Amino acid sequence: MTASKPLSALDPAPVRLTALTHGGGCGCKIAPKVLREALAGVSGGFPHPDLLVGSATADDAAVFRLNDRQALVATTDFFMPIVDDPRDFGRIAATNAISDVYAMGATPVLALAILGMPINTLPLEIVRRIMDGGAEVCRAAGVALAGGHSIDSPEPIYGLAVMGIVAPEHLKRNDTARAGDVLVLGKPLGVGVLSAALKKGILGAASYGEMLAVTTQLNGVGQRLGEIAGVHAMTDVTGFGLLGHLLEIARGSGLAASIRFADVPVLPAALDLLPQGVGPGAIERNWASYGEEVVLNPNLPDWAWRLLCDPQTSGGLLAACAPEAAATVLRCFRAAGFAQAATIGYLEAGEPRARVD
């Protein structure tokens, strides 16, 4: 962990947003197992021949075919503060929401804000700064922010409903990977660990800057990856951690996954904090949901599973691609500014499980 002073000592905020919530960022998501049980047997509505992607595979967004050349991609994502700075919170939440459209290989075009604020607790100037941060990201992504909906809520909530457009042949799902595919991850892990350290007041300013850079980096490279025929499946890594979202690909595609732990990119401060037991409670919830589907090499560090279950807010794209396309995929990531993008494993025929060596 950086030797600099804790962020709270360097830049005290008039109101600590993270102190107003019971959780933050994508760590607020309902545990995967609980969510599956809650949705079991719930009707997905009447079947429609133009609904290309619905809720069946827990994909990143719904997709509806408009015509032979265009499909509409629709998603929504919102959460409670992961940071105390209101503008940073707005930027992170907007970046995270737009990422679901990129993960489908699509171009985001329109967004509506989702806002819930404790009006009697938060000064209106802070609420404005949250919304300004979200609008800033929408402008950078070329997304029209066209209104939204707000409520008075006991905990601050912000996010977006986002719509995009994709050519049906460029659509990337999370259940179409193939045996032999290589796994490429675009961003480093550790965001949940660093956010927990921030809430405890032990995260240095330099490490906060690294976390902010990762969580506000738009996954726009997904549009380019959508055009590559060798990219067979794609998702983004968020609240269920790398293992959770990888298992969604494995289950949906009917394949076994293997990860090389040493190749997984990690935020440097997380490597110092994990052995100390720092991390959000969602790590344990995630492991309880899918740990039985994971085989860990006994020689790994005893905290390895915690990193792989760490909920990522605005995490990286995870692409499953043909081996001959892997170099092109990595070049696309690097050209888009994802310096830590890495090939981390592969998929093969077998029972849908994950092995980590």
Image (cartoon, grey):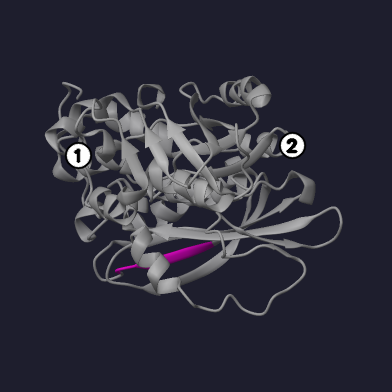
Identify the image quadrant of the C terminus.
top left
Specify the label residue 227 is tagged with: 2
Specify the label residue 197 is tagged with: 1
The answer to whether 196 is drawn above or below residue 42 in the figure is above
Q: Kindly indicate the quadrant of the structure image that contains residue 34.
A: bottom left
Residue 154 visible at all: yes
Q: Where does the image place residue 283, in percent across and percent down from the top left?
A: 26, 48
Residue 91 in the figure: left or right of residue 49: left
Residue at 24%, 26% in the rendered image: 271
Of pointers 1 and 2, the one earlier in the residue sequence: 1
Which element is circle 1 on? helix
**Cα gap from disc 1 to disc 2, whole angstroms:** 39 Å
Q: Kindly indicate the quadrant of the structure image that contains residue 161.
A: bottom right
Residue at 66%, 46% in the rendered image: 172
Identify the image quadrant of the N terminus.
top left
Residue 190 colored in magenta in the image = no
Q: Where does the image place residue 338, in percent across and percent down from the top left?
A: 51, 26
Please, what is the three-letter code of the amino acid marked with disc 1? Ala
Q: Which residues are magenta?
A: 113-118
Q: Where does the image place residue 266, in percent across and percent down from the top left?
A: 35, 27
Residue 138 in the figure: left or right of residue 77: right
Please, what is the three-letter code of the amino acid marked with disc 2? Glu
